[in-house]
Amino acid sequence: MNSSPNDPVATDAVSAPPQLVRALGWWEATAIVIGIMIGTGIFIVPAQITRSLGTRDAALSVWAVTGLLSMFGALSFAELAGMMPYAGGQYVYLREAYGPLTGFLCGWSFFVAAQTGGIAVLAVGFSEYTNEFIPLGHWEQKAAAAAAIVVLTAINYLGVREGGRVQSILTGLKMGAIAVIILMAYVLVRGLPGGPAQLAAPTGHRFAASFGVAMVGAFWAYEGWNACTFAAGEVKRPERNVPLALILGTATVIAIYLALNLVYYHVLPIDQVARSTRVGADAAVRIFGRTGSYLVSLVIIISTLGSLNGSILAAPRVYYAMAMDGVFFRWCARVHPRFHTPHVALLVQGVWAVALVAAGTYEQLFTYAIFAAFVFYALTALAVLVLRRTWPAAPRPYRVFGYPYVPLVFVLGSAWFLLNTLVEEPVEAGCGAVMLGVGVLVYWFWNRRAGPNA
């Protein structure tokens, strides 16, 4: 196994240009996982899932199944992260398992929509909930969203330690506030208000199709467990701490999501959960009274900032790794001589994310990118099996539990999810496929421009 060119430890410190530094510990890496995963989804998506399936148990099973699949994905990624603890994470794994085109297409989808579109979605969510406390007009909300991206990009520009500290603080505050909501729901609310025990529920084939559609929202809420691998080149003892962060962070979020859903059904009748546009706020009003809505808005602001900071910190390491390989703008491979961050990649990401906010196209792009993202999730999990055959002697500090069944279950679950999305949401799936097709043309152009030594 060849060492990656973006490994910050592999180069002579005297003669080399500035390098990334390993400054993130296990908690900072875990905070990236938890912080990115818990955004706004868990405070909104349960209503859509309840409407789709009609019963509490069916809705909870969606969260459990998607959580289990996410955990299987995290376990699979953990083996690869231990083998290849380099900046770029998932991009590197796909490049080594399938070749440079597959790795490029993954990074391309991240830059065009999956990561930058997600950053725009989070920033706009932050500005919308800030509007609860400070009334903002349409353009003022866009300006607030752009300002959040700029400020957090500046913090991460100044050093990965600084970005990691902010991530740790925001994630700690988020987890503490959610724990208070869960605890007080059972302390302050004794009886459920009157309402139906369940709604009209789909049966047979329609149940399976509805379950698959409901999984889209749940997967969106779980999105981000893979992101700490992007910054693996800056994690201390990465062969231990990156797998630990993936597993511990994903397990923590699964437990939080199931607990919050149980709170919603504990304090609200199921029909109110189903028709709510902000189920988290409605539940908080029931628990804390009229001030509860403001409490949840504050929690969501902290939550979105944590998710936003984690995404801004992690994703540029993919573009840095691509630039090191000659398949992205070369200047994105530059590392700041003082701050030791991929500062140009950070700036390029920030500019594109702000442009998406201003254009208002981020939601469509992000929705399309979810389909493409799961193609690469499935391929990355399958890479565990591929590399066990092609790199049998490579060091594996962590070997996936339940091999080969855990990665295979994740691959099959992802394949079913992709097929169901093709059938039930063909426009979104088709646009995701077009995005990848355009990426093939861009890769061809980049290689042709770079010449034979690229």
Image (tube, rainbow, N blue to C red):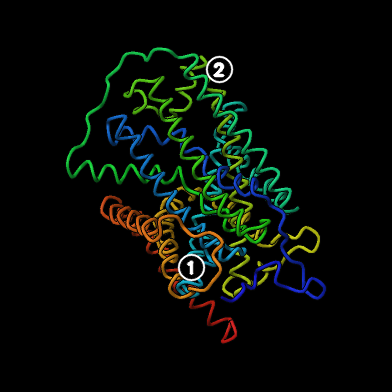
Left/right placement of residue 341 relative to residue 329 reads right
Vertical position of residue 44 compared to residue 326: above or below:
above
- The residue under the point 41% across, 19% down is 267
Q: Quadrant of residue 122?
A: top right
Who is closer to the viewer here, 171 or 283?
Answer: 171
Name the amino acid type tagged 2.
Thr
Residue type pointed to by label 1: Leu
In depth, the one of 213 and 426 nearer the eye is 213
- What residue sits right under mark 2 in the picture? 291
Identify the image quadrant of residue 440. Answer: bottom left
Helix, strand or loop at label 1? It is: helix
Of the 4 image quadrants, the one containing the N terminus is: bottom right
Which disc number belongs to residue 94? 1
Residue at the image point whose x is 56% and y is 65% from the top: 83
| Quadrant of the drawing holding the C terminus | bottom right
Q: Tell me where residue 255 appears, x and y as whole percent.
A: 47, 36
Q: How far apart are the two marked residues, 2 and 1, measured between alpha carbons?
A: 48 Å
Residue 336 visible in this rendered orientation of the protein: yes
Crowding at mark 2 (Cα within 10 Å: few <14, some 14-19, many 20+): few
Count of numbered circles on the image: 2
- Could you tell me residue 188's position as x and y percent? 49, 14
Q: Earlier in the sequence, mark 2 or mark 1?
A: 1
Q: Do the residues labelled 2 and 1 touch (CB within 8 Å)?
A: no
| Residue lying at 46% horizontally and 17% vertically, measured from the top left | 286
Q: Of residues 443 and 198, which is closer to you in this image?
A: 198
For the view shown, which residue lies furthest in the bottom direction? 452
Image coordinates for residue 166, horizontal then vertical, percent? 69, 42
Residue 123 can be seen, yes or no? no
Q: Where is residue 36 in the image (x, y as percent from the top left)?
A: 55, 45
